[in-house]
Image (tube, grey):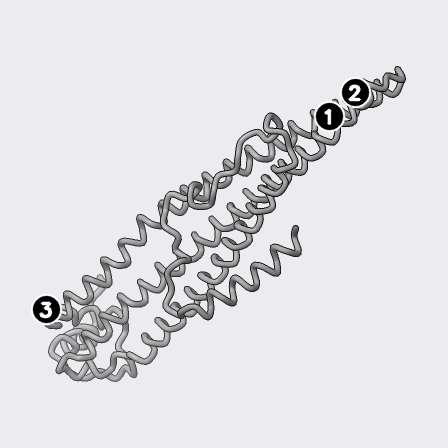
Amino acid sequence: MRTTKPCVLLGGLALLLGCESTATHLSRTDRDGLLAFVPEESQQEIERARERRAELDEQLAIAKRDQAEAGSLEGLATQNRAAMEVRLREGVGRLGHARDFDDDEALADARRQRAELEAAVRLQTAKQSYYDDVEALARRRLDLLNERAKLEDARVELAKAEAVAALDRPAAAKVDLDAQRADTNRAADRVERARIEALVARRRAELRAEYVEACAANVPEELRLQPIESIDAVFAGAAPEAAGDTGDAAEAAAEKTANAKGEGDQ
């Protein structure tokens, strides 16, 4: 028959009574065991941190649906490109047929149609690349929200650590506030890096949209198929990359990098 060791019972009793233990730092389990003793004001601060974290769950769900929507649009653009390439091959065939019959009028008409279809294929290829970029932005946004969720988790733990550390108990002195603050700062750094990546992805998609519009100007209306949807029309959720704590410098750097990438792709 298993028995509970007396030292385990005495260790737990010592913690509840505020007696000192030999551990260098208080474990998270032992620390959370002292939350019942923190004042109401501190309890409310912890609850607010938990509420901020819970709000991100809904945003994450929306971001996942947005990513699926972007993927569907990219798939449709791929089909449209393939259909236009089939029409171009047919146009090339008509051009060869006109040459065979030495029909000047038919040859001129076939050449015009081939040029129009070549421009249409370029347009559909640009659209496909645009939706590739939009899907990449969707992934970067989801990454950003996941990092923000981790940051809010760290902030919840920091709020609990600060509340327990403020207690007038010997065990409270063993709360490792420095480590918890360091964890929170590292999480904030990861959020900022993910935000910059999302800003770069958005700018890339915006540049690609401008290129699509330029291509469309050279294509007859009946060959353009569906117009592209704007970034804001694709995404149901708010733009998480628009909010940050580092100011304009990081955003300006991100846009500069995106401009260089976008111009090289075009």
Q: What amino acid is labelled 1 in the image? A: Gln
Classify residue 174 as left or right of residue 227: left
Q: Is residue 23 above or below residue 117?
A: below
Amino acid on which the number 3 mark rests in the picture: Glu
> Is residue 221 found left or right of 185 in the rendered image?
right
- Of pointers 2 and 1, the one earlier in the residue sequence: 2
- Residue 140, compared with residue 215, is above or below; it is below
Which residue is drawn at the image coordinates 24% and 74% (left, top)? Answer: 161
Q: Residues within 10 Å of mark 3 (few under 14, many from 20)?
A: few
Percent from the top left, x then y, of residue 170?
17, 84
The residue indicated by pointer 2 is 94
Tell me if 153 is positioned left or right of 165 in this view. Answer: right
Instruction: Name the amino acid, label 2.
Output: Arg
Above or below, 29 against 223 in this view is below
Q: Earlier in the sequence, mark 3 or mark 2?
A: 3
Distance between mark 3 and mark 2 Cα atoms: 82 Å
Residue bearing mark 1: 113
Which of pointers 2 and 1 indicates the residue nearer the eye?
1
Do the residues bearing badges 1 and 3 touch, measured as CB atoms within 8 Å?
no
Residue 1 placed where, x, y %? Answer: 22, 61
For the residue pair 12 and 234, the one nearer the viewer reads as 234
Q: In the image shown, does 25 or 102 lie closer to the viewer?
A: 102
Marks 1/3: CA–CA distance: 77 Å
Q: Report the Cα–Cα distance between label 2 and label 1.
A: 9 Å
Q: For residue 262, which quarter of the picture? A: bottom right
**Residue placed at 31% from the left, 48% from the top?**
58
Q: Secondary structure at mark 3?
A: helix
Residue at the spot x=69%, y=35% of the render? 119
Query: Residue under circle 3?
Result: 40
Cβ atoms at labels 2 and 1 below 8 Å apart: yes
Residue 30 seen by the camera: no
Residue for point 39% across, 55% down: 240
